[in-house]
Image (tube, helix red, strand yellow):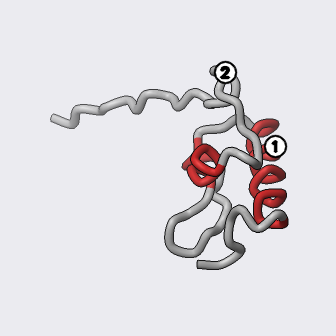
Amino acid sequence: MAEFFRKKKKVCPMCAGKEVDYKNIDVISKFVSKDKAKILPRRVTGCCAEHQRFAALQVKRARFMALLPFVK
């Protein structure tokens, strides 16, 4: 018998009320991979399309301001 488990749908953290800003490195680092410092895709972060684009913009701003590294 095959039992199927449904994954709980991820809720967008920004739709839930969490503020994302390029100055807050603790929050922004959750949108970047640990090993190569790449921006993570939507399926991993759980963001909606609008907020994923916004998070990518904030990561790029943090990199430009030297708050996050471009490459690890």
x 58%, y 47%: residue: 26
The label shown at residue 33 is: none
**Which quadrant is the C terminus positioned in?**
bottom right
Instruction: Please name the amino acid that badge 2 sits on.
Output: Gly
SS at badge 1 = helix
SS at badge 2 = loop
Instruction: Please name the amino acid that badge 1 sits on.
Output: Phe
Image check: 49 left or right of 12? Answer: right
* Residue 34, above or below 41: below
Image check: 46 left or right of 60? Answer: left
* Residue 10, above or below 59: above
Q: 3 or 62: nearer the eye?
A: 62
**Which quadrant is the N terminus positioned in?**
top left
x 43%, y 28%: residue: 8
Kindly identify which residue carries mark 2. 17
Q: Give residue 59's position: percent from left, percent from top.
A: 75, 56
Q: 17 or 23: nearer the eye?
A: 23
Kindly identify which residue carries mark 1. 54
Image check: 34 left or right of 71? Answer: left
x 76%, y 37%: residue: 51
Q: Give residue 29's position: percent from left, percent from top.
A: 59, 54
Q: 30 or 3: nearer the eye?
A: 30
Tell me which label, 1 or 2, sits earlier in the chain.
2
Disc 1 from disc 2: Cα separation:
14 Å
How many marks the image carries: the answer is: 2
Residue 2 lies in quadrant: top left
Image check: 2 left or right of 66? Answer: left
Q: Give residue 33's position: percent from left, percent from top.
A: 56, 63
Q: Are marks 1 and 2 in contact (CB under 8 Å)?
A: no
Q: 72 or 25: nearer the eye?
A: 25
Q: Residues within 10 Å of mark 2 (few under 14, many from 20)?
A: few
